[in-house]
Image (cartoon, coloured by chain):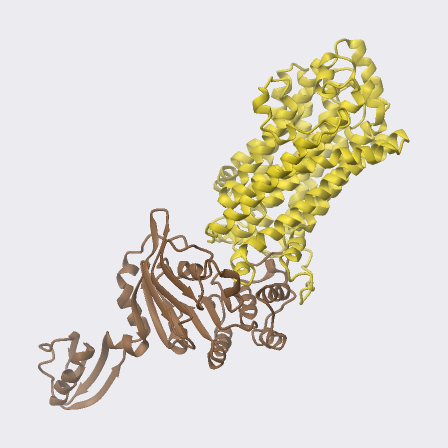
Chain colours: A yellow, B brown
Amino acid sequence: MTGTWPLLRHFLRRDRWMLLAWSLGITLLYWSQAVSVKGLYATQAEFDRAAVAMQSNTAFVAMAGPARALNTIGGQVTWQATAFGAVTAGLMSMFLVVRHTRAEEESGRDEMLRASAVGRGATTLATVLVALVANLLTGALVVLSLLTVPLEAADSLALGVGLAAVGMVFAAVALLAAQLTSGPRAAYGITGAVIGAAYVLRAIGDVGSPTLTWMSPIGWYQGMHAFSGLRWWPLVPLALAAVAVAAVAAAMFGRRDHDAGILAARPGPTRARAALGTPLGLAWRLQRGALIGWTLGLFLTGLSYGSLGSDVGDLLGDSATTQDMFARGSDDVVKGFYATAILMLALMCSGYAISQAIRPRHDEDRGVVEVLLATGLSRSRWLLAQVVFTVVGSALVVLAAGVGLGLGYALSTGDGSVLPTYVVATLPYLAPVLVLSGLARLLYGIAPRLASLSWAGLVFAVVVMLFGQVLQIPEAVQDLSPFHHLALVPAEAFRWPPLLVLAAIAVALTSAGIVSFTRRDVEVR
Amino acid sequence: MSNPIEIHGLVKAFGSLRALDGLDLEVEPGEVHGFLGPNGAGKSTTVRVLLGLLRASAGSVRLLGGDPWTDAAELHRRLAYVPGDVTLWPNLTGGEVIDLLGRLRGGIDERRRADLVERFELDPSKKGRAYSKGNRQKVALVAALSSDVELLLLDEPTSGLDPLMEAVFQQCVEDFRAQGGTVLLSSHILAEVERLCDRVSIIRAGRCVESGTLTELRHLTRTTVRAETVRPVDGLARLEGVHDLVIDGLRVAFEVDTPALAPALATLQTAGLGTLTATPPTLEELFMRHYGDVAAAPEVEVRS
């Protein structure tokens, strides 16, 4: 495989920041669980009581995994972090693999690379090695972070190694998907579906039918029983699966033509539908996938928070830390918890709003905007259509989160009357969500390369929400987060003024963004 | 009626880089105007200023009697544009893109659309990601040519097309001109320019260095003369305007400036002419003369 080594170095150089961000993020997921559990319960008795309550909550088990040794810090970390950790490592692997294989083939860069003196499979091999580096790095960082807590070395090691192994299974799946499809989006879709299926299989399995758990790589990882009778053998099926799937992918790679997928591309319509003649119709056509995905995702997340029902009181215990973190000054822990849950859901909705607000940048990057704006479509109408679409889309995503939360709560408590309360409590958060996406539009309007900076706004808001009180961030700084102003319904009574001010700011930012865009040069290659 | 394109003293600066540096360009109604220049000379930048995608730093630009920056959308209904490097949405088919662009321009001529899809042998059911470079070009060409417009802005529109399709394209442009349309054609395919263009402007480093009909431009350069004489020829070397003289026995070859053509031929006749060929300069020679030194020392690639 001539050329694998220089290609690997090239890939690692291209990915170094992305790779670091993913592995640090995943490490934080594990480490923060350990640290937060450490201070949560004042006494072991309280911890035991909470553990019993958690164990008996089916929704919790379905979300996180088999409930084992929940009255220990290690058990808590394993329970809370492994399922999401595995999913996240899978996503990281998916992005890395597809980015260097199918996406590169589509862009034509792969052709250039392969035309140089590199072996046929060098790009593919280098991609697998990048995924390996990424997963090993993530695993190693997780182990190190857990050792600082400190937790038992062998079990910590198992959590890290198992995570890397799961990541590699999904990397192999992504590699296989990249052979099947002829476009990167479809490859992301297939891999994402496999990761989702693995998560759901183990969820159903953990609740009732263990056989299903053993059909999921995430189930194998959790089957290592770290911190509760560690066993190493589940690493064997993980390694076998990764190698086998990668081998199938390699065989397919050897048989297919460059730029072709094993699955033949289907011909599409030769004429456009009537709807695809307006900028709004175009926005719908290009962005509907993201909208449907986010709406569904937020609905399900809301549903899972809601399904905790009124049990949250038992789960959280009575320590002062808990009161600070969840009750947010309210006497009622349940209401406080749900006020916080709504805030968290709203922050997730911002992910949709920001990613779609800066989407025009991709059209500008790729150059399609040039042909589009050379028609009778003015810049302001082009951008406005996308703003309208994403504002309505954001409203839909926020609504879905609220309905999911209310519905989950209603189903788990049998009390349907709270459903409208939770929906109404969620809706005002559209305003801060739109402030963040308005900021993104303004940055994009000024210059497309600034657009990504808008993610910093979301990171800031998350930090203020999670650590504002713990780190004692000054109130004036916390006030900069648009999410810091709304009344925490249902823990507090609703107030109109902050909502109206935030809405006005969102409108102002968005308008300024559109105006800036119409005044600057379109950036074309 | 004013000219469809009137550019005077156009400057476009990207930071400290002056991509256009006092460019003048006039395109008259009903003509096909060739727009030539080496890579990075500012051709695409000019077209993008005309489209209102880039804002002029200085100078005056009139397009179809309007201001391309402020009246962009209204003006665009009356023109169609084909870039040299067409990018498509990976998940829209070629047919969908043609319809989309046509509708956004304010309507599409159905009969012409069907005719063009057939003539260019385009498969409109393929997704954008599956098209080759030449086929992406065809999608943009069909979209542009099937709209009812007065002006075509074509920026190296045939890059990636095969010679058969190139011929179809040339026929389409001639049909468009026959119906009174105006075309600005930026191209590196000199045969295409020679065949299609009524007038030509050559730009270099952001300025127009030559503009006129091909005949006028030829006048400015040299004719290649080859002859066989009966007796050895004498006196050519002393003539002003004769260059690169090669005498090989009775065969003689030289290049001559247009004013010196008549005296040079007279000198040949004194030696008794056997055979004579006189070749007017090709566009390629015009081209090389105007930026031959650029080819020797390429400029820094301008991001345009």
Lateral position of residue A454 relative to residue A267, left or right: left
Horizontal and vertical percent position of residue A91: 66, 38
Residue B237 coordinates in the image, percent (x, y): 11, 77
Q: Position of residue A101 (x, y in %)?
A: 58, 47
Q: Quadrant of residue A38?
A: top right
Above or below residue B50? Residue A199 is above
Q: Quadrant of residue B92?
A: bottom right
Depth check: give the residue in front, A297 or A465.
A465
**Relative to A507, A210 lies left or right:** right
Q: Residue at x 62, y 77 (%)?
A: B111
Task: Tally the numbered discs.
Answer: 0
The reply, left or right, for residue A40 in relation to residue A97 is right
Q: Tell me what residue is drawn at x 61 percent, y 16 percent.
A: A148
In-image side of B266 versus A426 (left or right): left
The extreme right residue here reads A414
Residue depicted at x 76% and y 31%: A220
Q: Is residue A45 visible?
A: yes
Q: Along the line of sight, which residue is nearer the eye, A466 or A19? A: A466
